[in-house]
Image: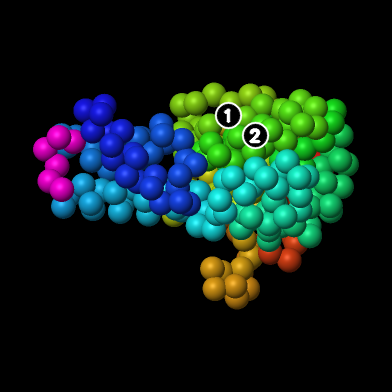
């Protein structure tokens, strides 16, 4: 079964935007879709459907606009960090707001950051004197970040992590946790997974963000996430809300003290 599984993983990752995703994440998605079916007994038509289903799922979590890995690595080596940040949808949209976001983070007087589904955030937010844990399902982006940390002598660690498994996979403790534009993607209507993320991450502060525009680019009529606010109040967490041009942020202090 292992060889057959690797063969299907390879086929799924032939799509450029999925090439950097960890094999283990792809394998888990395949197994989840086939459930108890025997992989060897699947017909070729069934494997084609399986490949399409897994690709569709992984596109949701990895982003659909990606640039060639070698080109990104070249940008990093040439210190073209601004250009590099603009190769990822979320960091491109957040680009002009990063300086303000860094000021807000600096005001918290933190010494460590845990960035879940980080994308390329660390290239804009990591700095000397702050330990940075960067996690994602895309190994190619983690490789870029690791090289960035090394080149700038930043105390950082990268690791593959599937936030959907937060109940089962331990995470490092940090002063600040970042979950930026992630919960809408992984969440279902019940918001149970979001609640687990908020409760399980062992941090002093937690910063969540959500898009305020639709995929079409039009502004949302109701960008505030009332369900988040109701959830935080039920859990007894104080929070502040602020916005950028494209996002709404919830800065949460995970104690009963005021921010």
Q: Which residues are magenta?
A: 39-44
The residue positioned 25% from the left and 29% from the top of the image is 3
Pointer 1 residue? 159
Could you tell me residue 14's position as x and y percent?
A: 38, 48
The residue positioned 56% from the left and 50% from the top of the image is 68
Callout 1 secondary element: strand
3D distance between C-alphas at marks 2 and 1? 7 Å
Callout 2 secondary element: strand
Residue 78 position by quadrant: top right
Which of 178/52 is in front? 52
Could you tell me residue 206's position as x and y percent?
A: 69, 40
Could you tell me residue 220's position as x and y percent?
A: 60, 71
Instruction: Look at the numbered discs 2 and 1 and tell me whether their residues touch, using CB distance below 8 Å.
Output: yes
Could you tell me residue 51's position as x and y percent?
A: 29, 49
Residue 129 position by quadrant: top right
Q: In the rendered view, does 159 fall on the left or right side of 4?
A: right
Which of 109/158 is in front? 158
Image quarter hosting the C terminus:
top right
Color encoding of the figure: rainbow
């Amino acid at each position: 079964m292992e060889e057959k599984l690797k063969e299907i993983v390879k086929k799924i990752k032939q799509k450029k935007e999925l090439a950097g995703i960890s094999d283990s994440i792809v394998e888990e998605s395949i197994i989840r879709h086939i459930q108890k079916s025997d992989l060897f007994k699947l017909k070729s038509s069934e494997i084609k459907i399986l490949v399409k289903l897994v690709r569709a799922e992984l596109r949701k979590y990895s982003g659909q606009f990606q640039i060639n890995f070698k080109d990104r690595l070249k940008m990093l080596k040439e210190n073209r960090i601004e250009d590099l940040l603009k190769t990822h949808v979320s960091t491109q949209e957040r680009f002009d707001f990063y300086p303000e976001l860094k000021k807000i983070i600096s005001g918290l007087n933190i010494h460590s950051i845990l960035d879940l589904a980080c994308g390329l955030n660390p290239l804009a937010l990591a700095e000397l004197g702050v330990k940075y844990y960067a996690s994602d399902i895309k190994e190619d982006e983690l490789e870029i970040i690791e090289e960035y940390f090394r080149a700038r002598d930043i105390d950082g660690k990268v690791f593959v992590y599937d936030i959907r498994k937060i109940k089962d996979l331990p995470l490092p403790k940090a002063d600040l946790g970042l979950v930026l534009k992630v919960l809408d993607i992984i969440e279902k209507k019940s918001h149970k997974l979001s609640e687990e993320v908020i409760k399980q991450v062992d941090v002093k502060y937690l910063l969540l963000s959500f898009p305020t525009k639709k995929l079409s680019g039009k502004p949302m009529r109701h960008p505030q996430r009332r369900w988040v606010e109701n959830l935080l109040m039920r859990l007894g967490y104080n929070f502040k809300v602020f916005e950028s041009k494209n996002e709404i942020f919830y800065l949460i202090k995970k104690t009963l003290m005021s921010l």
